[in-house]
Amino acid sequence: MKSPIKPKMHTVFVHVSDLYHSVEWYHSLLDLPYNQEDVSLPVYNMPMDTYTGLVLDAGPEGNKKNTGLSPHPLFNLHTDDIDEAYQFVVDKGMNIASPISRFDDISFFDIKDPDGNVVMICTG
């Protein structure tokens, strides 16, 4: 039987404890405007420029989610200029989890969101 599951990444779910704060943080990271009135529990769909979506998930209303962190990046966000991206997050006072690593065909660094989720910023 041929698999009905397609080799296509659809949506990444990031589990957060404070949806409103996380929405503000991710919008700031991506320099996207937003209206806080459009945010409502339990999930928020980040506006993305690609087919793959990013959903911030705070879980059922009234329960603070324990996010159970991984020390590894959950996903990466693309940049064409790693140095400019690094300076941007430094200027925003965001939590940098690793310095820039540079290779012939890829450069990256990691940051942490307000819940400590690791996000890679990557040129590859």
Image: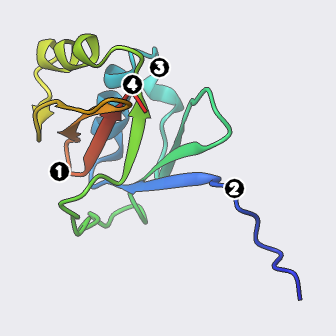
Q: How far apart are marks 3 and 2 (CA)?
A: 28 Å
Furthest residue in direction front, as rendered = 104
Front position in the image: 8 or 13: 8
In the rendered image, which quarter contains the N terminus? bottom right
Label 3 secondary element: loop
Between label 2 and label 1, give the one nearer the viewer.
2
Residue at 87% across / 81% down in the picture? 2
Residue 27, labelled with which disc?
A: 4
- The quadrant the C terminus occupies is top left
Camera-near label (3 vs 2) is: 2
- The quarter holding residue 108 reads top left
Tell me if mark 3 has few (under 14), some (14-19) or many (20+) residues whose alpha carbon lies within 10 angstroms of its own.
some
Task: Tell which of 38 and 49 is nearer to you.
Answer: 49
Q: Mark 2 points at which residue?
A: 8
Q: Mark 1 points at which residue?
A: 116
Contact, mark 4 vs mark 3 (Cβ under 8 Å): yes
Q: Is mark 2 on a helix, strand or loop?
A: loop
Kind of element beneath mark 1:
loop
Residue at point 32% right, 29% down?
A: 104
User: Which residue lies under the disc numbered 3?
Assistant: 34
Do residues under tags 1 and 3 come within 8 Å of each other at their CB atoms?
no
**Do the numbered discs 4 and 2 sit on residues whose CB atoms are within 8 Å?**
no
